[in-house]
Image (spheres, coloured by chain):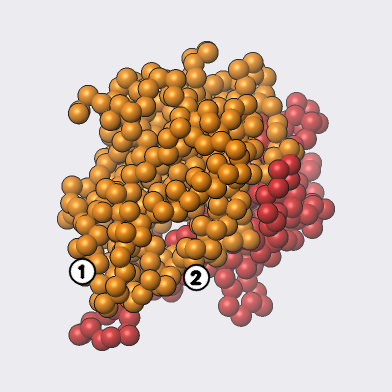
Amino acid sequence: MAEISSKQADHWLALASPRPEGSWGCRIESVGVKLPAQMLTTRDLMNRTSHRTRIQLERLTGIHERHVVGPGENSFTLATGAARDCLAHSQHQAPDIEMLISTSITRSRGRSSQSFEPPLSLYIKQAIGATQAVNFDLSNACAGMLTGVFVLQDLITRGEISCGMVVSGEYISQLSWNAAHQIRSLFSKQLASLTLGDAGAAVIVERTPDGTPGIDVIGFTTLAEHSRLCLAFPSTVGPGAQMYTKARKLHRVAIEDMAPLVAEAIGEAGIDLADIDYLIPHQTSARAIRKGTEEFARRLGAKPKHVVLNLEEYGNTSSTTLFVALHKYLEEQRMHKGDRVMLLALASGIQIGIAIFTIDSQAERYGHTH
Amino acid sequence: MGTRIEAASALTSHGWRRPTARHLADAAARTCLAYAGKEAGDVDILINAGIYREDNMGEPALAALIQEDIGANLGQPPVGGQGTFSFDLANGTCGVINAIQIEAGLLRSGVIRVGAIVTSDVDPNLKDPGAAPFRPTGGAMLLGWDDSVSGFTDFCTETFTEYEDLFVSGLVWQGRRGPRVPRRPNGQSQMIIDQRLGYQARLADCAEDATRRFLGRLGMGIGEIDLLVPASSSPDFLDPLRARLGIPGDRVAYTAEDFAGAYTTGLIAALQAAIKSGRLGDARNTLMLAAGAGITVTLALYRQTPP
């Protein structure tokens, strides 16, 4: 088996692109989601701030409501629920999973607001019966799940494993409550914490049969010069963390630097931005996403056919946003076999990750619950 | 053709007034780059496998801060330039071998040319500071591609979940008692580390089982292992393991006393000792072994033989 062609010397991104004549193909086989039943509207959240803020959060961000955990739910239960949903949509059984990577930023389980050891992935693999899986946790802020896919993609295309799962459960609404106690104005560095919602997501990545479409390109880079634009630490207000974000600068840097990186990725895939049927960006605020998309179109001379926005009902579900959005579109049968999708991760670090893949037969296993 | 260890560096916090996880990893990374004769900008991927930090920062990945500190490709991304990708990996003391496996794969694929792994652990705001099972240390290693050696050829990870409760750690919210006072903290999250009796002995049992299965699968005998590089030199773990496997003491890379209690840095400290003594260079087959919470055992075989 030939090795994957090296493009590192020509690219800013750490970029992998399986070649038909070389390594194994690789695809996203199924996606699962676990959403808590309880909802919290932006109006209710803003009514519970300790100070009169006068912030029109819904108008600013496009977020109307978000799911939040109820009693007995935490990062572990959300991750496990998502992993089970993913298996329910998959042709694989839990014992088929050879590697399981948990990428939750929040790792609450039992009385622990942040579990360290053993890794959360160990408990998840036990809970779903993936007893043969090699497991570890990976932490890369909101880009964690796509980073996990990047890792699995390499192992699969080289033939080291044939099937792996990336899973994340985010009980991150604690940050909203902690921020609500302290936030005073629109200029607070904790403003972004008010956009967060809870969710679990899981994805199975597998080796593809010959000639089957899958992941065309996946790449990542860290713009570490801006590593301090978003920081989260354990809170002294309540359980969980507090997050401080220089949101305007972060978005300015992201818009500025993402365009050449997207150009690298689509160039490697041998396509144009207009060939992308669905662009799924990290869900932060509707306004920022629209502005970013317009800037891409201006710089790259083309724009994707659709830009996916699901903020209105989910908010920013941190590391799970891309796959919650992908799952929603598959369930609603908006995506079809042959559609080309670009996932665009943006996270503190600053981490930028891009994956381009083609929807295949997995689309047929969604939508029956509607 | 294989993944080659370019350099390894480990350090303790001796002489540091207030050691931080970030600064220990920074210092180790800079020394390691100097040993390898490379620039920070040569690093294509940087994985931090350290666990315990003074501030228990949730995001960004500590690796991104370390990348910034050492100055690895901080410029704007022009087309045709080179960037660095950084993230954290957590699997206790076993995380370093998981990180080696990931980077060895990316080197084999040609996605990267140089990979760095860093580690560090310091007091993470422990509820009971005496309960810390480790000493503040930092480490770094560099991996590259070499056409003349086999390098890292085989990896193995086994978990023994019946012992998952023997070592548990996590942040637990401790609310302040009494009425709520404006501008005063309501409490804090403190790290609880619960290590039960018999943990080290079970680590040795599990490591022995996993090692025998791993070598059996490769068709190798213990006698073919020229050097054992363990992640822990704790006598409670290493002495019974070595005795049961029948590995003579002169085929084990022990760390200096300074590194007793090194946690995620343990494997890199042992590797540094083996490199400095010349024993790594002399060994044809080196077995790297880590065992930690879960119980998880990770193993890697490093061959300095022609491919």
Which residue occupies 32% across, 59% down?
A59
A184 displayed left or right of A216: left
Q: Nearer the viewer, residue B29 or B272?
A: B29
Q: Secondary structure at mark 1?
A: helix
Which residue occupies 18% across, 51% down?
A38
Q: Secondary structure at mark 2?
A: loop
Q: Position of residue B207 (x, y in %)?
A: 49, 42
A79 displayed left or right of B209: left
Dot 1 surroundings within 10 Å: few (below 14), some, or many (20 or more)?
few
Depth-wise, is mark 1 or mark 2 nearer the camera? 1
Which residue occupies 44% across, 49% down?
A289
Is A54 above or below relative to A316? below
A77 displayed left or right of B69: left
Amino acid residing under circle 1 = Asn
Which residue occupies 75% across, 26% down?
B307
Q: Is residue A318 visible to the viewer in this orientation of the structure?
A: no
Q: Chain of mark 1?
A: A
Q: Chain of mark 2?
A: B
User: Which quadrant holds residue A172?
Assistant: bottom left
Disc assigned to residue B28: none
Q: Are marks 1 and 2 in contact (CB under 8 Å)?
A: no
Q: CA distance from mark 1 to mark 2?
A: 35 Å
Q: Position of residue A260 (x, y in %)?
A: 64, 44
Identify the chain drawn in red: B
Q: Position of residue A41 (x, y in %)?
A: 21, 57
Circle 2 residue: B54
Amino acid residing under circle 2 = Glu
Dot 2 surroundings within 10 Å: few (below 14), some, or many (20 or more)?
some
Chain A visual colour:
orange
Circle 1 residue: A47
